Amino acid sequence: MPEEIDHTARWIQSEAEAQELAALVVDPERTSMLICVTTQNAASRPLLDPDALATALGDRAQVWVVTDSTHAWALTEALPPKIDVYGGAVRAWQPIAAGSTPYPTDHPQWTVFTEGDAAKAHDQILAYAEMLDNPPPAFGTKAYGLVTAVRKAGAEIELTSGHPAFASTGHLIQHGDVYHAGEILMPGQEVTVKVGPWHAQAGRVSVSLRDFAPDPWERLTEVYGVGDLIEGIVSEIKHFGAFVELMPGVEGLLHKSKIVDGFVEYVDDFVLPGDRITVRLLSIEPYERKAEVSTIDVPEGETPEPPASVFPGGPPWIPDAPGVFPGAEDNAPSADDAAEGAPTDPGNEPAQNDAGSAAAAVSTPAAPTPTIPSDDATTGPAFAAALAFMVEHHGPQVRKDLVGTPYVAHLMSVSALVLEHGGNETDGVAALLHDAIEDAGGAEMEGILTERFGPEVARIVRAVSDTDEDPKPPWRARKEAYLEHLKSVDERALRVSAADKLHNARSLVADLRRDGDLLWERFNAPKDDQLWIYGEYAGAFDARLAELGAEGGRTAELVELLRGTIAELQTLASQDAPA
């Protein structure tokens, strides 16, 4: 017989009842879902209404409520590792087969710190329950869908099964880099995808197009022929010439002898990385992965072939206007978009050089600062220089703990988190130096960072600094101003800020376990204020991510880790940490 489900929530009143719930969680005879709603530190009721949730779920799940930290710890101790719940979070437990090891991803958790979180979690739990009634295509299978929206973070897709899906930019193609999903896809485009896991917190399934992306070299030969005039983006300068990206995953060699008629000593007198130029396709060898281009025979005013699409039926990979993609939800030439790394307009003026006919083919923006880090996944001399600069300016400083941890340990940890969650070298350098303006020089330091590491690093560091005043303004006013500031930061700055707060929160958890309430004596603000600001940070990050359209991206992963750490911090702070 099917289990009878109580349509009202059950409020746990004792440790014995907490242990009863834990026994139900691991009972192999259980066939229905269990949901546990918890309260934040020092709160008597959860923000999410458990009775309303129980009514909405009906027979699909039984809802339990834990409001006492002692009962929460009793539940944690009785459950298998990594599927516990406390500190304002909500956990859904699926049936667990006898002898199996439960994995956290099979039993999703929602963190709730604000009324907005509660409403969002309520809706997402209902969507999760509906998904279980009508599951999406099986993990790893092929499915079909229609693109409904494109953003910098990826593409929203509606599968033919009716399920919402999301493909991040890293799962669109196999070769080359993608700045914005609008380079590859556009609304209304039909796609074939490989099905990934369902994400309960986002209410959709992750999918990938990588397995079905055309080989870029074969695609190039489908749309262009030798002799065609085509557009490309200069990707790299060498002593013997330049490489020009002809579409994502395809680069052609522009040899220095093919730039102008005459001798070329320095290639960067004529082209620079990031230039959008018109070239003639001299040769293409798809099986050898080689192509050669020239800017010599490019008549002034002649229109090149339209930029190719990566997928047949897709948008041109180079947009008509920099940073503006067909049907994109986050198009636009806002300051935030530009700060996120949108391509800058090279302008329509010819390059100012003595290159003769090359002037019609090459437009040259102002030269970048030579010391700026590269915007790719590798690290190089700029990162090494930033490490040395960090030690020079922060080496004597120590953390506010009882063991005198070198402050540079925090800076390196923040940089590691940034690089592990989608950041490139520029972001990693900014993370290493994220406290330089606030704690090591103020506005004067901002100028030094611009000179040494480029304006983008300085901009990110400025964006994550809550003050450069000395003495600093009062703690509460400073933090409230920073929360307001987070409403307008771009994704790069948000990633660094989230990594900073995550490492700080992890350090607080470790210190609280070791030092107990002595921890709070080292701070300018009292314990309750410290707990308050971390809850506010999580809510502010979530709100800004939603506006940026980066939900499900790597920065969102950082924020989710931060939420879990904050929940642990608040629980530990409410009582003595267990041995």
Image: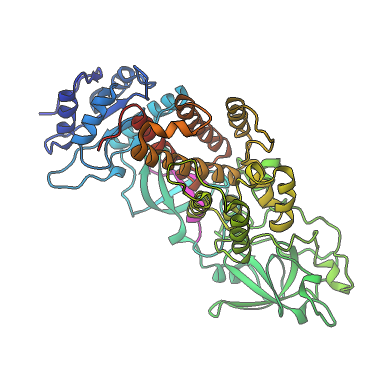
- The quarter of the picture where residue 563 lies is top left
- The quarter of the picture where residue 177 lies is bottom right
Magenta stretch encompasses residue 160: yes
Pick the front one: 395 or 463 = 395
Q: Report the magenta residues as a range.
A: 154-173
Magenta stretch encompasses residue 457: no
The colour scheme used to paint the residues is: rainbow
At horizontal 42% and vertical 53% (from top left) the residue drawn is 193
Q: In this view, does 557 lie to the left or right of 131?
A: right
Q: Where is residue 110 in the image (x, y as percent from the top left)?
A: 37, 33
Pick the front one: 42 or 163 = 42
Q: Where is residue 135 in the image (x, y as percent from the top left)?
A: 31, 40
Q: Position of residue 380 (x, y in %)?
A: 59, 66
Q: Is residue 7 left or right of residue 110?
A: left
At horizontal 61% and vertical 41% (from top left) the residue drawn is 464
Q: Is residue 524 left or right of residue 463?
A: left
What is the number of callouts on the image? 0
The answer to whether 56 is drawn above or below residue 160 in the figure is above
Quadrant occupied by the N terminus: top left
At horizontal 65% and vertical 67% (from top left) the residue drawn is 246
Q: Where is residue 488 in the image (x, y as percent from the top left)?
A: 64, 35
